Image (spheres, rainbow, N blue to C red):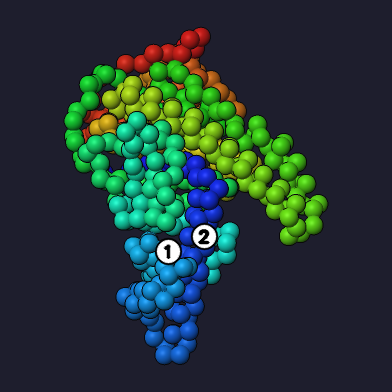
Amino acid sequence: MLRTYRYLLRPNSSQAEMLEFLVEQHRLVYNLALEQRINTYKENGKGITYPSQWKHFRDLRRDNPDTLGLVNVSSLQQTLRRLDKAYSAFFRRLKSGEKPGFPRFKSRSRFNTIEYTYGDGCKLRTSENGRVTFYVQNVGEIRVCYHRRIPENATVKHAYITRRNGRWYVSLALDLPNTNVPREPTGRQVGVDVGLKNIAVLSTGEFIQNPRWMQINLAKLRRLQRHASRQVKGSQRQRKTYQQIAKLYEHIEHQRRDCLHKQSKRLVEGYDLIAIEDLALAFMNRNRHLALSSHDAGFGIFRQMLEYKAESAGIPVVAVKPANTSQACSGCGSIVPKDLSVRIHECPQCGLVLDRDVNAARNILTLALQTPLGRSGQPVTWAVAPGVG
């Protein structure tokens, strides 16, 4: 089971300067390697492989001990492999008839990550007083916000050092063994209906409201963008304004992910089975009236978080087709047609009256319980939302 843990690094001024230097060396190697591949093909009509390029840059590294010689060997190999993967993906898309997208030369703003093999040039270190730092070759021990402990049985494979909006992060790729330890069952299942007004409505009658992170910051974002458009193109002041815009976008992203992490964790801990809609989000993301709210809600991120957290806990997440889940009555199963503007479900057959999203969540859970994973669960019990029904 593969997982990635990301931590914030807090380098001092000299360490930050050295990290900038290493990223720049990797960028130059990437561009030189790309130029070498292009020129070789023009001259010989044949491409050049990664092993041949590695021999060339290995010798170049030995000849320049004060610049390229400061770059870790395995990290340099990873940068060359990165270009090799870009070429492989280009030819794969070309053969399949997709838009090819030839590998491009990287400007300073487009190259922000370097990869290490963990233990070779970088490693987490713990001092005698329990303080954790992240060691990088030729940089030293960097302060790290170690907010999440790495499991003892995990194997760290790779480390990715990333520069983003003036901050430095390290992402550790972990290989966690599948323990298959069953969690204490709760005896409860839940259906989840997602929407724009509420991020999720549960079959228990609970409403998880949509904080609308983008909408809250939209006025400030528009002011900054207008300000940038009026500044001299390419000026230092305009670049600073763009940095403010990028930091605001990052802040919105952190707000969104923090909320979705908390809600998905709570659902996984509280239920033995989670039923969700198997939504194709393209119809909302391509609609000019719904696209902003759809991206702001982060339905795809929410589902991804639910699935990987549930996998770690051994809890099934069942995705069902959303067809007629809002129209069908969760009490008797009869179809009750209604427009999107009608928010209350009223069944003329059995007399059931409740919120249409709660009704849809119950139908989603019913469909999930008809699957092989759902049939292995306990009988479902519903709790109607206060004031509804």
Residue 322, labelled with which disc? none
Q: In front: 100, or 119?
A: 119
Quarter occupied by residue 97: bottom left
Q: Quadrant of the N terminus?
A: top left
Label 2: which secondary element: helix
- Residue neighbourhood size for the residue with mark 2, other residues' Cα within 10 Å, grouped as few (<14), some (14–19), many (≥20): some
- Looking at the image, residue 274 sits to the left or right of residue 7; the answer is left
- Residue neighbourhood size for the residue with mark 1, other residues' Cα within 10 Å, grouped as few (<14), some (14–19), many (≥20): some
Q: Residue furthest top?
A: 387
Residue at the location (49% across, 54% down)? 19
Kind of residue at disc 1: Leu
The numbered mark, 2 or 1, whose residue comes first in the sequence reads 2
On screen, residue 172 above or below 376: below
- Looking at the image, residue 5 sits to the left or right of residue 244; the answer is left
Label 1 sits on residue: 70
- Looking at the image, residue 35 sits to the left or right of residue 370; the answer is right
Expressed as whole percent of the image width and height from the top left, the position of residue 196 reads 55, 32
Kind of residue at disc 2: Phe
Residue at the location (34% across, 36% down)? 127
Expressed as whole percent of the image width and height from the top left, the position of residue 125 reads 33, 42
Label 2 sits on residue: 21
Camera sees residue 204 = yes
